[in-house]
Structures are given as C-alpha cells and as structure tokens.
Image (cartoon, rainbow, N blue to C red):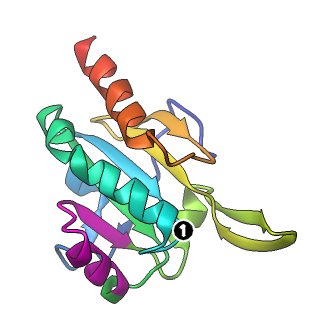
C-alpha cells in the first residue's frame, strides 16, 4: 500500500465517459479511487452500487468517485449500463495503475494462490496527496465509511 501524506501516483487510462481519464483531471477536488477485482461479480457489484447510491453526497462534498479494475472498457460499459452507475469506471488492462498503487498481489481463495486485485480504496486530497487508505476492503458499508471519513475531513 502507498503511504498517507505521499503524492498519489499520476496515471492516464481509458474511462467510460471519455477517451482518457487522468488523475490531473480531478485535482482541486477530493478523489475516491477504489480498486475492485471484476465487473458484475457479487462483491464488486455491491461495492459499486453502494458508491452509486451515495454519489450525490460525495459530489456535494466536492469529491469525484472512480472505480478501477483490469476489466476492459467494453466490460465496464456493460456493467455501468446494467446498474445505472453515475460515475466513471476506469480500465487498467495492462495493470500499470494497479501496480503503481500496490494493489496487484498474491491472493488466496479456496486453498489456491494467484495474482489478483486486492480490493482497496484511496481517498486523495485536492492537491493530489493520499489522505486515507483502506486495504483488503470488506464491501459491506465500505462506501458509507469512506463518505463519513470525507465528511469529517471537509468539516475541519
């Protein structure tokens, strides 16, 4: 995991709303960047739809939300349409961003080990600094916890 108070690594990847999304596009706002393993799987769908339900509250606090996985743009567009997702999903098929953010690693499932996306969320400040990191995220109530953390920060 990357450390709090360090600069979030910059990147540019295909996005569901424009050709390329760059972290620089969101500077001046807070950014929630959540990494998830796979479109349209139970945990990832729950996490994404939870963020989607709260998107207007994130926006009111001056925060962009972006989900990112190694799935293709085609897969993201299908997922976004199916669940009426109101924010961008970012495609990192070559794993460059996942590796920069240190969320690509060894996972264990049913006794076997493999490489995959470690479900993680980064809260990034207006100047591009990492404010908070959640690693090995448990999906239930995660979006609410991120929103609460952001709301407390904005109050200060």
Q: Which residue is mark 1?
A: 37
**On the image, which quarter does residue 82 sit in?**
bottom left
In the rendering, at what x and y percent does residue 52 appear? 25, 53
Residue at left 57%, top 56%?
119
Hey, which residue is sitting farthest top in the picture?
156
Left or right of residue 133, residue 1 in this image: right
Hey, which residue is sitting farthest bottom in the picture?
74
In the rendering, at what x and y percent does residue 95 appear? 55, 74
Element marked by disc 1:
loop
Q: Which residues are magenta?
A: 75-90
Left or right of residue 83, residue 70 in this image: right
Instruction: Decide whether residue 83 is among the magenta residues.
Output: yes
Residue at left 54%, top 68%?
37
Residue at left 35%, top 46%?
32
Left or right of residue 127, residue 118 in this image: right
In the rendering, at what x and y percent does residue 63 appear? 22, 40
Q: Is residue 66 visible?
A: yes
Instruction: Decide whether residue 101 is among the magenta residues.
Output: no
Q: Nearer the viewer, residue 58 or 45?
A: 45
């Amino acid at each position: 995991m990357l450390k709090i108070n360090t600069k979030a690594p910059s990147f540019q990847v295909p996005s569901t709303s424009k050709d390329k999304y760059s972290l620089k596009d969101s500077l001046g706002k807070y950014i929630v960047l959540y990494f998830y393993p796979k479109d349209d799987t139970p945990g990832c769908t729950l996490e994404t739809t939870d963020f989607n339900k709260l998107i207007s509250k994130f926006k009111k606090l001056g925060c962009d939300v972006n989900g990112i996985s190694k799935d293709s743009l085609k897969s993201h567009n299908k997922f976004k349409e199916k669940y009426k997702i109101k924010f961008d999903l970012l495609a990192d098929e070559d794993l460059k961003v996942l590796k920069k953010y240190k969320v690509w690693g060894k996972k264990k499932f049913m006794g076997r080990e493999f490489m995959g996306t470690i479900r993680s969320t980064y809260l990034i400040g207006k100047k591009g600094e990492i404010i908070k990191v959640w690693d090995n995220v448990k999906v239930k109530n995660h979006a609410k916890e991120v929103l609460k953390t952001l709301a407390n920060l904005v109050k200060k």
